[in-house]
Amino acid sequence: MRSLKALLRPAALREKLQRAYRNSELRKLQLWFKGKTLHWSLYLVLASLLTVVVLGLQHYRSSFFYVVDIEGEEIGMVRDEATVEQFLDELTGKCSSFYGMPVELEQDIVLNREYRSSGEENPAAVKEALRQQLTLVADAVMLTVNETPVVPLKSEEGIGEAVDLLSNFYISRADNKLLKTTLVEEITATPCCVPPETIYTPEEAYELLRGGKDPGEGRLLLASRSGDDLHKDEPCPTVHVRTVEEVKVVKKIPYKTSYRYTNKMWYAQSRVAVQGKAGQKEVSYHVTRENGEEIARRRVGERVLKKPVTRVVKKGTAQAPSLGSGRFLWPVLGGGRITSGYRTASRPRHEGIDIYHPAESSACILAADSGVVVDSGWDYCRGNYIVIYHGKYYTVYAHNRVNKVSAGSTVSRGQVIALMGNTGRTYGRTGTHLHFEVRLGQMKKWSRNPTVNPLNFFSR
């Protein structure tokens, strides 16, 4: 057996081809026609037959088309498959340039070469059908909040930018030292494939997460290739940015009051020897906020900035002199009438008399006798009131609109000390009037002394 190398030599190969030709049927046909002369009609038949064969072959070949299918649905035929491929390349290229990202076809497009004897290509119709029916998609990442899909973005970096914008929105509003920033919800990125027009920018995603924009109908209809449910009918989850700030507040430190007693002043008299001044302290808090709203505050320390100054008041201990005559003047200028008398045995008790004057709040209240003002102030029952010590008695003037004398003052019989009013617990039933009491002067605390009927001190 000759080797493979010998068979591949040119001379040997040529010899083998010649031997095969001499033994072939073509060689036998050639020898049969050699020396024979055919009639012209036979030549005509052979030429016609050859023409028919050639035309039939050409028609057969021209009846083959590329049938274009989208997801199994036929949309038309083209003669050259390059027509469709070129159109799709141009379409995806233009869209990729427009959206600034690579895009691809979502549907499967199949070109099958088939024999259609009565078919006709229509490249324009095929292109228009492709333009109308094709859906372009791009690779993206889905921003999810607690595993709930919200919106797609180009990349994980875009999600990071949206989260940074959201955090900075609340951080920039903080006026104090920021200690910590966290997100309450878990935000993750999941790969997805969506139409490029549904992809959000970081700024749009930030506005949506902050609740600043309505995404609009259709923006969340983001059917991904994987068929993930995007909860398009659910509202966008709220994302909470939690911050911890150090807040420092300057507060007042109230001053204290100390009393120094002296027998050089009457017991009803007092004088401020040292004015009190409030101090200042800086209190530090750790304040926790969610989306700018305070949810917790914890005190972590304080520092005294300025110490308070104690207020020193000198109070008299000496017995006030007996300045009264014991014969009282009617305590309302211009008279008036008694609307409620003195009673202690019945209920409710009334330990004085009520005097009404038509002038009401402009009516002047007079000191019934000379004496020392031992109390001038306000309480819930009496409203504005004045108490005068006359030696053996105290007189009490209540429900005044305004007091015109202060504790420690000496007053003369008939001096204007107040204006009639309706302050304190009068229940609105008695109206503007003076409640006038007389109490015995046995103890320094006037309110502990028993009352007597004021009418016993007037001679009218």
Image (spheres, rainbow, N blue to C red):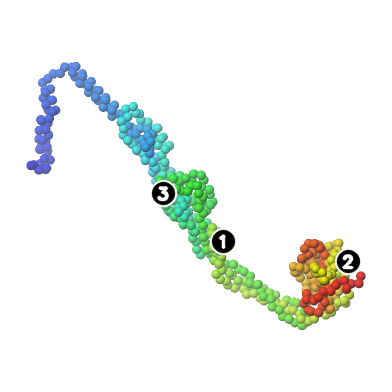
Residue 398: % across, % down:
80, 68
Which residue is more in the foreground, 245 or 420?
Answer: 420
Considering every residue shown, the one lying at the far front of the view is: 346
Q: Provide the residue designation for mark 3.
A: 192
Q: Residues within 10 Å of mark 1 (few under 14, many from 20)?
A: few
Q: The residue tagged with tag 2: helix, strand or loop?
A: loop
Q: Residue at x 19, y 16 (%)?
A: 41
Position above or below: 90 against 390: above
- Three-letter residue code for mark 3: Cys
The location of residue 305, given as percent across then percent down, is: 60, 72
Among the two numbered marks 1 and 3 on one chain, the one whose residue lies closer to the N terminus: 3
Quarter of the image where the N terminus is located: top left
Q: In this orientation, does residue 215 appear?
A: yes
Q: Which mark is residue 294?
A: 1
Using the numbered discs, state the Cα–Cα distance from disc 1 to disc 3 in whole angstroms: 37 Å
In the image, what residue occupies the spot 10% across and 30% down?
A: 22
| Marks 2 and 1 in Cβ contact (< 8 Å) | no
Quarter where residue 314 is shown:
bottom right
